[in-house]
Amino acid sequence: MQEFKLQSPPKGRPRSTVTDGLMSPPQTPGSDPGYMSTGTPTTPSNLHLRRKAFRFSASSVEMSASPPRWDTQLDARAFANQSQYEPSVEVKPTTATMAAEKCARVYNMSHNKRGRALIFNHEEFRDMPPRDGSGIDVKRLESAFTSLDFQVDVYQDLPVEKLKEVINEVSLGDHKDEDCLVVIVLTHGLGNGLLFAKDYAYPVEHLWAPFAGDKCLTLAGKPKLFFIQACRGEKLDGGLTLVKNCTQTDNNLSNYKIPSMADFLLAFSTFEGHYSWRNPEKGTWFIQSLCEVLEEEGTKSSLQDILLEVSRRVATNYESYNDFFAWQHEKKQVPQINSTLLRQVYFTPKESLNKD
């Protein structure tokens, strides 16, 4: 792992926004003029630097030992001639209880329980800088999802084996009386789809693979929502300034078949390959915006509309500030939402459902 030292800068400089990549540059307090939720800068404060800062990339990060292996199943098999391909595992159709009618435009959210919201918060790491301020995100997430009737469970600084154990245990549970599932991960990230537990990196798809419709039957046909707050590479978004232009068939069958990977929503804090920004005193741009919009319209608007508004706020209301490292100054961020949802998601309050 590469290491470099930072000399103490002149007193009086504001601390800069930090990323959720594997680097520990100067950090931005809530008074940093570059951290804006309403577009109004505030008074700067003093700059504080750690004695050492680390920067890793997907190509240079070194593991102290081989990481624990995740249980894997056949994903693909290379073959030169498609006619010669013979799968080693027979893929058979799977049957699960229908959660919503085929033509339904909205997911059925009238089960007895809303479902579980798992929060995996990583602040301290074995070989990497801490993610100061992540606890602020956790508190607000707990409040936001509890108000939407979720059973919220927080897991702090888990090693990869324990994280794997929790995911597998939940995927094997009985969710037939639940509307959906939420999984939130707050951590350091690398390019190539890698996230960090306390000790080792793991592929991000291992979070949702156990919940595919053919593996977790009691969540088949139900929304499975994943929110990932982490860097996804080392690219920075300098943004651009926009100047105003003055001239400016259904069928009648009741049973139906869906793909195993349907009904997933993967909300990443930043676009693939880019940094994600965090403020040690106010939390991350993405999570704070998500909670803000959920608190305002979580029971009224569809999740898809909520995430569109979250993306707009992150992209337009925030900008990094760093007068010590120019390459981190005035940078932008935009979330990336990947979805295989088949219907709209509404978090209708359970109390109103019971009254009806």
Image: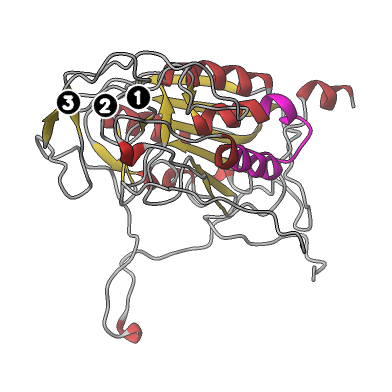
Residue ID at (51%, 31%): 285
Residue sitting at x 35%, y 13%: 46
Q: Is residue 283 left or right of residue 97?
A: left
Q: Are marks 2 and 3 in contact (CB under 8 Å)?
A: no
N-terminal of the pair, mark 1 or mark 2, is 1
Amino acid type at mark 1: His
| Marks 1 & 2, CB-CB < 8 Å contact | yes
Q: Which residue is mark 1?
A: 122
Bounds of the magenta segment: 294-313
Q: Amino acid at mark 3?
A: Leu
Horizontal and vertical percent for residue 195?
Answer: 32, 39
Q: Tell whether position 299 is magenta.
A: yes
Instruction: Look at the image and say whether residue 68 sits in the magenta stretch.
Output: no
Local SS, label 2: loop
Quarter holding the C terminus? top right
Dot placed on the residue nearer the N-terminal end, 3 or 1: 3
Q: Residue flagged by tag 2: what amino acid is it?
A: Lys
Could you tell which of marks 2 and 3 lies nearer the N-terminus? 3
Residue in the image at 12% along x and 40% along y: 62
Residue 160 image-quadrant placement? top left
Q: Is residue 115 left or right of residue 251?
A: left
Indicate which disc residue 6 carries.
Answer: 3
Q: Is residue 172 left or right of residue 201?
A: right
Name the residue that disc number 2 marks.
Answer: 198
